[in-house]
Amino acid sequence: MIREILKLGNPKLYEVSEEITKADMELLPEWVADLHDTLMDYRKTYGAGRAVAAPQIGVAKRLLYMYTDKPYVFVNPVLTFPDEETYTLMDDCMSFPGLMVMVRRYQRADIHYLDEKMQPRQMHLEGDLSELLQHEYDHLDGILATMRAVDNKSFYMGQMKRD
């Protein structure tokens, strides 16, 4: 089901999400389907969008969904950084379409997580995928890209398209 994406200023976006537990397992397929449907609808509407975090659709759980070459489900992810190399970029978000924010992100990241079958997985990320999952992971901790702006002049109104 397509869910409403919470917009900038909604207090739920600033909450720290809870881990998914065994008690949540029967809801996981529904949450993943809703994340998928919502992401695909956003892509159809805005021509952009590669990932979405559960808190963006009002589910305060540590769950990320990414669709690049195929779907990826990240349950209770843990993000670490193998080195200190960073770069700056203009970041956008489904929670504030049309607003771009200059942020600093790590060039590389490692993500450890459970997949939708609760199997442990890990992935090494570089460049735009590293940035993407840092952005989505921040949502799990109630952090928006606007809060990571490099300074108070790092905002741009306008839509940048990504595939």
Image (spheres, rainbow, N blue to C red):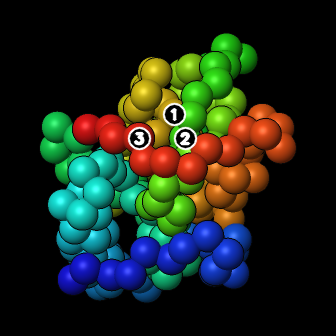
Mark earlier in primary sequence (3, 2):
2
* Separation of residues labelled 2 and 1 (CA atoms): 9 Å
Q: Which residue is mark 1?
A: 131
What's the residue type where badge 3 is placed?
Met
| Mark 3–mark 1 CB contact (< 8 Å) | no
**Observer-nearest of 111 and 138:** 138
Within the image, what quadrant is residue 90 found in? top right
- What is the x, y in percent for residue 105? 63, 30
Q: Which residue is mark 2?
A: 91
- What is the x, y in percent for residue 132? 46, 40
Which residue is found at the position 61% from the left and 70% from the top?
8
Q: Does the image show residue 86? A: yes
SS type, badge 3: loop
Q: Which residue is mark 3?
A: 160
Which residue is found at the position 32% from the left and 77% from the top?
31
Mark earlier in primary sequence (2, 1):
2
Which image quarter is the C terminus in? Answer: top left
- What is the x, y in percent for residue 95? 51, 65
* Separation of residues labelled 3 and 1 (CA atoms): 16 Å
Which residue is found at the position 24% from the left and 57% from the top?
43
**Observer-nearest of 82 and 88:** 88
Q: Residues within 10 Å of mark 2 (few under 14, many from 20)?
A: many
| Mark 2–mark 1 CB contact (< 8 Å) | yes
Q: Residues within 10 Å of mark 3 (few under 14, many from 20)?
A: some
In the figure, 56 relative to 3: above or below?
Answer: above
SS type, badge 2: strand
**Observer-nearest of 136 and 18:** 136
